[in-house]
Image (spheres, rainbow, N blue to C red):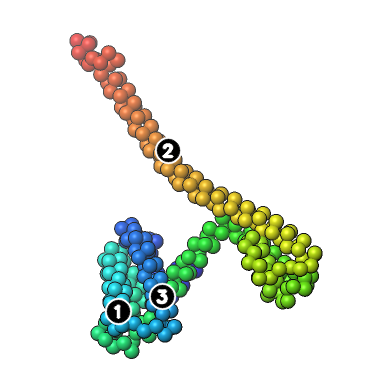
């Protein structure tokens, strides 16, 4: 719900879940190209921010490709949606980018900075969608709780090692050391020199191995549960089909019995038999 409200607020809500199936299907198909486009927009913004100069032709072609993609997506999805007005209303940023891109295409590059700023909102929307997806995954099989406990353990360990080992100067250095130790990376830039610090480091490494074992088991259980849900849905459909077949067979048996009673058990007409 929060994701939908934010996307509507910034005008990048996409296709509503209650829309026609063909519109939702095309909305999903365009998610991949939109993600690639967002990566290119971010890269182009970074190069411009770091002082990289683009040739006018390259700038024009890049803006043209981005502009045509927004036009294509907006026109296609709006035409497929049953409520076109609602789609355009909740995706007003696309219209603003399309309208704002026209002066840039005609050579008025003073609007290019504003256009890039509008495009960066696309990154915000995509990041918010990804974060909600990640939160949805973490909420399954206690994965989020394990990560939260691991993070808390890293923070506490970092502060503790800063107090017990002279090689760790500040709690921030201790937290960095605890982070690379619990992940069993161990860059070696900060190394405990005291015996108690090394013992504590060994315990932290062991805890890191246990933590990642729990995370691996949690993710494995998540994917298995996803497959089980798909199988359960297929089983439900199969059961419904079998129930429908049984109902039709019972109806056929009832009609056959009625027909036999009307025509006689031996299949002859009872009126002809009496005569």
Above or below 230: residue 93: below
Q: Quadrant of residue 212?
A: bottom right
Q: Position of residue 52 (x, y in %)?
A: 39, 83
Q: Earlier in the sequence, mark 3 or mark 1?
A: 3
Residue 58 tag number: 1
Question: Closer to the camera, 204 or 145?
Answer: 204
Q: Earlier in the sequence, mark 2 or mark 1?
A: 1
Residue lying at 40% horizontally and 39% vertically, measured from the top left: 238
The answer to whether the residue labelled 3 contacts the one labelled 1, judged by CB atoms less than 8 Å apart, is no
Label 2 environment density (alpha carbons within 10 Å; few <14, some 14–19, many ≥20): few
* Residue that badge 2 annotates: 239
CA gap between label 3 and label 1 equals 14 Å
Left or right position of 62 against 180: left
Look at the numbered disc 3 and give the secondary structure of its residue: helix
Q: Position of residue 117 (x, y in %)?
A: 40, 81
Q: Position of residue 237 (x, y in %)?
A: 41, 42
Q: Position of residue 146 (x, y in %)?
A: 64, 58
Look at the numbered disc 2 and give the secondary structure of its residue: helix
Look at the numbered disc 1 and give the secondary structure of its residue: helix
Left or right position of 147 against 108: right
Label 1 environment density (alpha carbons within 10 Å; few <14, some 14–19, many ≥20): few
Above or below 257: residue 31: below
Judge whether residue 275 can be spotted in this image: yes
CA gap between label 2 and label 3 equals 51 Å
Residue lying at 76% horizontally and 63% vertically, measured from the top left: 198
* Residue that badge 3 annotates: 43
Q: Earlier in the sequence, mark 2 or mark 3?
A: 3
Tell me the mark number nearer the camera, choosing from 2 and 1.
1
Where the C terminus falls, by quadrant? top left
């Amino acid at each position: 719900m929060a994701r939908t409200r934010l996307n509507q607020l910034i005008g990048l809500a996409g296709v509503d879940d209650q829309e026609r199936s063909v519109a939702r299907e095309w909305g999903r198909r365009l998610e991949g190209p939109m993600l690639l486009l967002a990566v290119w927009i971010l890269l182009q913004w970074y190069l411009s921010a770091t002082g990289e100069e683009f040739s006018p032709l390259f700038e024009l072609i890049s803006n043209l490709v981005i502009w045509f993609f927004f036009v294509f997506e907006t026109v296609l999805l709006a035409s497929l949606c049953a409520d076109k007005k609602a789609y355009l209303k909740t995706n007003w940023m696309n219209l603003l980018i399309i309208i704002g891109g026209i002066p840039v295409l005609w050579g008025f590059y003073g609007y290019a900075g504003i256009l890039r700023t509008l495009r960066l909102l696309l990154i915000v929307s995509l990041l918010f969608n990804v974060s909600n997806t990640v939160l949805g995954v973490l909420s399954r099989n206690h994965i989020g709780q394990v990560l939260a406990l691991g993070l808390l353990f890293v923070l506490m360990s970092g502060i503790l090692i800063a107090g017990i080992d002279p090689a760790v100067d500040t709690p921030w250095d201790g937290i960095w050391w605890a982070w690379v130790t619990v992940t069993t990376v161990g860059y070696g830039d900060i190394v405990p020199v005291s015996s108690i610090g090394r013992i504590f480091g060994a315990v932290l490494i062991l805890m890191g191995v246990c933590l990642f074992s729990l995370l691996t088991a949690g993710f494995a259980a998540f994917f298995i549960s996803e497959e089980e849900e798909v199988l359960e849905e297929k089983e439900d459909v199969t059961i419904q089909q079998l129930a429908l077949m049984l109902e039709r067979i019972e109806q056929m048996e009832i009609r056959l019995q009625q027909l036999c009673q009307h025509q006689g058990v031996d299949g002859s007409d009872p009126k002809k038999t009496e005569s």
